[in-house]
Amino acid sequence: MTTTAMPLRETVGVTREERKVIFASSLGTVFEWYDFFLYGSLAAIIGATFFGAFPPATQAIFALLAFAAGSLVRTFGALVFGRIGDLVGRKYTFLVTILIMGLSTFLVGLLPGSATIGLWAPIILIVLRLLQGLALGGEYGGAAIYVAEHAPPGRRGFYTSWIQTTATLGLFLSLGAILGTRAMVGEQAFPVWGWRVPFLLSSALLGISVWIRMQLNESPVFQRMKAEGKASKAPLTEAFGRWSNLKIALIALFGLVAGQAVVWYMGQFYVLFFLQNILKVDGFTATLLVFWSLFLGSGFFVVFGWLSDKIGRKPIIIGGCLLAAATYFPIFQAITERANPALARALETVKVTVAADPAQCGDLFNPVGNRVFTAPCDLARAYLGQSSVRYDRRAAAPGEPVRVLVNGTAVPFEAGKLAESRSAVTAALQAAGYPKAGAPGTVRMTHVFDLRSAQVLSIIGLLFVLAIYVTMVYGPMAAALVELFPARIRYSGLSLPYHIGNGWFGGLLPATAISMVAQTGDIYFGLWYPIVFAVATIIIGVLTVPETKDRDIADLG
C-alpha cells in the first residue's frame, strides 16, 4: 500500500489545469511532427536537391532512405531520452527534444544543395535527419505519459487520444504549409527554392512550442514517485535487463505496435507515394487528396480513444489491423481505377513480357538503393517497374538478346543503347494503351476546394477509409502503452517498443514496398509488407496482450 504524499484526483471532471496539459502537450507535439513529416512529404524534391548526382529513380530511393535513417535512429532517442525522462522528469525531457527537432528542421531549410557544396550536402542532410529522429524518439513517450499521468481514472483513452491526433495533425499542417507555399510561389519556383519556406517556418513554431511547454508543471505521478523515493536509479537496466519487464516490451512491440506502425504509414505516407510515383498523379493533386482524407479522418482518433475507455484498447487496435489486412488490395485497386483509369485498363489489357536468358536476370530487390544494375534484363525490368507497367518473364535461349514484348510485338533492349531502348519500349507501351503522365482522365485538382467531381470525391472517400484504419490502431495506442508499464520505468519501457515498431517496421515500409514492386513488376505487390505485419500483430495480440483500460497507473508498487 503506497502513501499519498501528493494525492491524485479521482473524479472524472476535466479541470482547467487538465485542459491546459492536454492542449499544451498536444500542440507542442503537433509542431514536432510537423518538423519530422515535412521531409517525408517533400522526399522527391529533396532527393533532386541533395542527391542530384544520381539518376532520378536513385534520387527517390536515397531520399526515402534518408527519411528511413531518421526513423531508425528514433530507437536510440527512445533509449537516451527514455532514461532521462525516468530519472529527471517528463516535462524537461520533452522540452529538450523539441529544441533539437526545431533547430534541425530550420537548418534543413538553409542547407545548400549538392550542386553548391557537393558531397557535403547529403552528408549534412543525413546528420540533421538523424538529429530529428533522435529528438522524436524522446518526444512521443514524454507527451503521452505526461497527459496520461494527469488523466482521471476511466478517461485515459480519451485524454491521450488528443496526443494521438498530433502525428496526423502535424502531417496535415506540413501538407498545408506545402500547399500554401506552392500557391504563393508557383509550381516552377517551388522545387527550386520554395520548398525551403515550410522548413524555415519551423523557427516560429519552435518558439511557440517552447513557450507553451515552459508553462507546464511536472507530472503528479513523477512528483509523487520522487517524493517517496521510488524512482528507478537505473531505468534501462530495470526495463530491459529483467525478464518480467522485457517481456512486456516484447508483447507491446509485436502484439500492438508493429501492426499499428504499418497501418499508420500505409494510410498517411505510402498512399501519397503510390499516387505520385506509381499512378503518376501530379504532386499538387496527390497532396490535396491526402490532405482532405486526413482532415475528415482526424477527429476519429478521439472517437476511438473515447471508445477504448468503454470497451477496451485491445479490440479496437486488433480490429483496425484486421480490417486493413482484409481490404488493402481492393482499396488500392479501386484507387488506381479512379485516379488513373487509363493505367488501370492497361494493367488489365496490355500483356508485357521480358524475354531473356534466366542466367542474365538478377535480383532487383534494392531497398537501400546502393545497387547498380548493368545487365539488359535487369535494366529492362527496372524501367518497366518505374513506368508502373505490369510484366511477366519468359525464359529465352542462352545468349539470346533481351526483348520486351508488348502484346506480342518484340522490342530489343540493349544496355549499350539504353536511351534508344527505353524510348522504343515507351512508344510501344503507349501505342498499346499505357498512358503518358498527366494523360486525360487522370485525376487532377486545381485548388484546395476543387471538390466538385465524382472522381475526386470517390478517391477522397477511399483514402478516408484508410485514414479510419489509422485512427483505429493509433487512437487508443498511447493509453494502452502507458498502462502496460510500471511508473518507475514507464518512459524507458514505453518509448523503445513504440519507436522500434514505428521507426523500423513503419519507417522502412515505403522503400521496402517500392523495392518489392520493382522486383515483381506488380504495382500492388508492396501491399504484402503491411499485410504480413498486421496479421502477425493480430495473432500475437490476441494471444498475449492483456486488456489494461481499468489499471491504476498511479500505483507505484
Image (spheres, grey):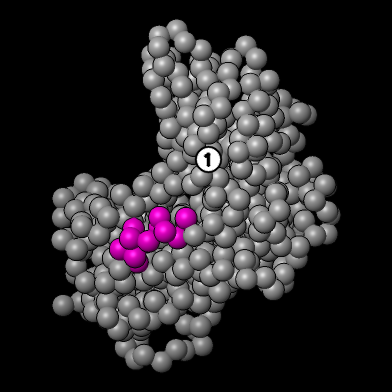
From the viewer's perspective, tell me whether residue 8 is left or right of residue 130: left
Q: Residue 72 occupies which quadrant of the picture? A: top left
Q: Main secondary structure of the magenta part?
A: helix
Residue located at (63% from left, 21% from top): 421
The picture places residue 138, in percent across and down from the top left corner, at 45, 54
Q: Which residues are magenta?
A: 320-333
Per the image, is 328 magenta?
Answer: yes
Residue at 69% x, 30% y is: 52
Question: Residue 514 appears at what percent x and percent y?
Answer: 48, 40
Q: Nearer the viewer, residue 113 or 235?
A: 113
Residue closest to the eye, 353 or 177: 353
Write down the residue under mark 1: 350
Between residue 522 and residue 402, name the one nearer to us: 402
* Residue in the image at 61% along x and 35% along y: 429
Res 315 quadrant in image: bottom left
Dot 1: element: loop
Q: Residue at x 43, y 80 (%)?
A: 303
Quarter holding the N terminus is bottom left
Q: Residue 444, position in %: x, y?
A: 70, 59
* Residue type, label 1: Val
Q: Is 349 colored magenta in this rendering?
A: no
Q: Quadrant of the C terminus?
A: bottom left
Occupied quadrant, residue 222: bottom left
Asked whether the viewer can see residue 305, the reply is yes
| 189 sits to left or right of 460 | right
How many marks do you count on the picture? 1
Judged left or right of residue 395, residue 299 is right
Q: Crowdedness of circle 1 by 10 Å Cα count: few (<14), some, many (20+)?
A: some
- Tell me if residue 40 can be seen: no
Q: Position of residue 456 (x, y in %)?
A: 63, 66
